[in-house]
Image (tube, rainbow, N blue to C red):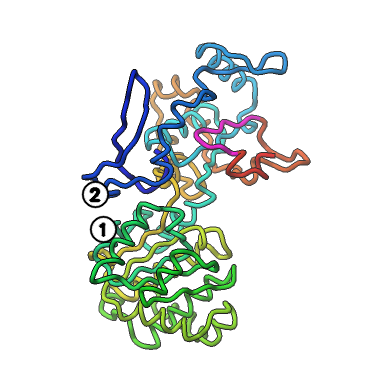
Amino acid sequence: MLCSNGCACDIAVKDGRMVGVRGRAVDRINHGRLGPKGLCGSWQWSDQDRLTTPLIRQDGRQVETDWDTAMSRIVAESKRRQPLAQGFYTSGQLFLEEYYTLAVIGKAGLGTPHMDGNTRLCTATAAAALKETFGSDGQPGSYNDIEACDAIFLFGQNMAATQTVLWSRVLDRVERTDPPVIVAVDPRSTPVAETAERTGGVHLAPLPGTNQALIKGLLHELIEHDWVARGYVEAHTLGYDELAATVAEYEPERVAEICAVPATEIRRAAEIFGTSERVLSTVLQGFYQSHQATAAACQVNNLHLLRGPIGKPGCGILQMNGQPTAENTANAAPTETCPASATGRIRHTSTSSYRRTCGPAEGEVSSGTGASVSHAGGDRAGTSPTRSCLSYRSEVRAASPMRFR
């Protein structure tokens, strides 16, 4: 499990070792293709520096040991420390059951509220925006929408670099006799932006931090030109009048001043969205790691709500994630995006067998979300509330080098 695309692989094994990988030709996701991570997936299993036995620190250096000794050391150190001095930092590359088990160990076993995941750095925005708009963080779209849509809007996603296999599917459509019109929202000139111009679409290059204003400008144009599915909006949405009032002052000329994007390009992008029968949108880090991230991602959802046909072929919204089970860690483990999901279930467990397994008696289970990774790490002055941290399937030094310090 390497990225969020979900490619199927055939793995070659020789003499008990993994020696090669290829894409599965009949798979409905990758159609036999693999990206760089998938193609190089066999390397990590054969490297000589891969850890195969536990290491413990003795006399200032790490030495090999057996699993019983290593696990006993962890248990002993955990018991020696206060619950609030311990933290968990997980990833988006485990299975649902593993996230829940970690939540049980941390919340019910150790009694610490300090549990977080690296998905806060990306997926938190996707989950929050979907929950805010739809009440659930399930994606209202499918990769198959690529083959059925009339237009593709990529908001802050350079898909040619971040999801190469999925981008290949887009290029397959572009080379067909009925290519979709592509609109790229990215401050940089990218292969996606070049393809947008080639398909008769638009490359919108807003100033960093102005995504919210740009989407408000698009919403303004949809309402101004009545590119709105009135029946759908009245039957299935709330807050239309408030939205219309909010975006009323975001005319293309004003948005152009804020975003440094020509008003003609804003109008053209809005026209594509408003007049295309089937529109697919994808959203990623260009929106998620920017000013007013969740609000801007919600406005992308609002664009689709105004047009109406959510759930029909070619009409999806993909608030993208960077890891395969990123939403699972938000829901099964007590991270900030869904603080009550695991803790609520644990608090209501009162069987004696569960207490014997997890440690604290009923009423002693930590129910708070605790410090996030951004706070639990503290700073160079030593203000961290935690004194030990379990990092699981996440290379903090590479992903957050400043926090790792």
Q: CA distance from mark 2 to mark 1?
A: 9 Å
Residue 389 is inside the magenta segment: yes
- Find residue 95 and report its image quarter: top left
Residue 349: percent from left, percent from top? 40, 32
Q: Which residue position holds label 1? A: 144
Figure check: 182 above or below 141: below
272 relative position to 296: left or right = left
Which of pointers 2 and 1 lies earlier in the amino acid sequence? 2
Rendered-image quadrant of the C terminus: top right
Frontmost residue, 317 versus 131: 317
Residue located farthest toward the right when viewing the structure as drawn: 381
Residue 88: percent from left, percent from top? 55, 34
Bounds of the magenta segment: 388-396
Give the secondary structure at mark 2.
loop
Instruction: Tell me whether the residue at label 2 lies in contact with that at label 1, contact meaning CB atoms closer than 8 angstroms.
Output: yes
Query: Mark 2: which amino acid?
Result: Arg
124 relative position to 222: left or right = right
Circle on res. 28: 2
Residue 205 is inside the magenta segment: no
Residue 155: percent from left, percent from top? 45, 66
Give the residue drawn at x 39%, y 41%.
Answer: 38
Give the residue drawn at x 37%, y 82%.
Answer: 271
Figure check: 297 above or below 378: below
Query: Mark 1: which amino acid?
Result: Asn
Circle on res. 210: none
Q: Disc count in the image? A: 2
Figure check: 58 above or below 351: above
